[in-house]
Amino acid sequence: MESSQKSNTGLKIGLGILLVLFLGSAFIASKYYTEGKEREQELVGQKQEVMNDLNNMAKQYDEAIAASEIKDQDLIEARERIQGLMDSLKVSQNSVNSLWRYKKKFLALQEEMDELLVENDRLKVENEYLATSLDSTQTQLAERTVFTDSLLVQNTELADVVEDAAALQTVGLVGMGVIERSSGKQIPTERARRSDKIKICFTVAKNTLTEAGDKELYVQVIDPKNNVLGSNDQVQFEDQVLNYSVISRFNYENRNLNICEYISQLDDSNFEKGSYKVNVFNDKEMISSSEFILR
């Protein structure tokens, strides 16, 4: 009888210990869950702050672009970089490392915006002076107010804009007419008759899944009369034939790569006035498309 009582007492003590351990574990788990939720809410709030800052920055660029009488390619490209970062931020994970990367990119874009807007203000003042002191045409004024070569070749950081995929992707595709000086200096122009060449620029985006090495993309430029400019050669892909203007060949090292290709006039004739379409193909797949106008 005494032995049975001792056994029952030991069982009760054991159950009591197990109950204490269970309650302690539940308390710790609840605490970690609550802290995790609070941390997640904090990250979501910080992510929204970065998104709001990018939205404000985009509005400043929109105002500067709208106020500019001449199409400012640097401002437009900078605005596209901000949009790309916003698109990437929307689908990013809520983590400290991810948010820190976006904050660093925001700070870099903020510094770039300050420089571009200061330069844009300087050029606006210069435009006003030229308008009152020179009896020049709109083309002559545009030639005096374009950005210098150093601004036209600014590096872009679009590493997180394009989702990782095995195929090469391009962003920031733009086309324009350029006047080529004897010194080699190039000046963008929207005038068909003044264009010596058509300049096509794009960025091959960083992709860690793509094998590094020599790559090629097909660039197709179609004029207002639906003619393929440049070499107008053909390449066969199974049952599909592609007419291209130029093959863009480059060495890819799994990081952002800025590329520009050129299309020259044929037989010393002027380029046609109107809308031009630019397409970039990775094999038979079109990966980017853009349009521009020569007047």
Image (cartoon, grey):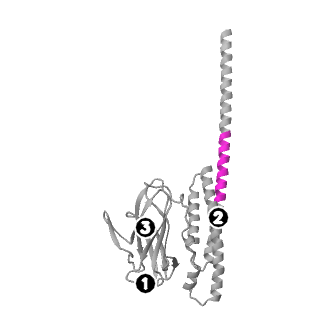
Secondary structure under the numbered disc 2 in the rendered image: helix
On-image quarter of the N terminus: top right
Residue count near mark 3 (Cα–Cα under 10 Å), binned few <14, some 14–19, many ≥20: many
> What residue is shown at x 43% (from left), y 60% (from top)?
251
Amino acid bearing label 3: Val
The answer to if 12 sits in the magenta stretch is no
Q: Is residue 295 above or below residue 35?
A: below
Are dots 3 and 1 in contact, CB under 8 Å?
no
Question: What residue is disc 3 on?
Answer: 280
Residue count near mark 2 (Cα–Cα under 10 Å), binned few <14, some 14–19, many ≥20: few
Amino acid bearing label 1: Asn
Q: Nearer the viewer, mark 3 or mark 2?
A: 2
The segment highlighted magenta reads 31-50
Question: What residue is disc 2 on?
Answer: 111
From the viewer's perspective, is 160 left or right of 224?
right
The residues tagged by marks 1 and 2 sit, at their Cα atoms, a distance apart of 40 Å
Secondary structure under the numbered disc 1 in the rendered image: loop
Q: Position of residue 76 (x, y in %)?
A: 57, 71
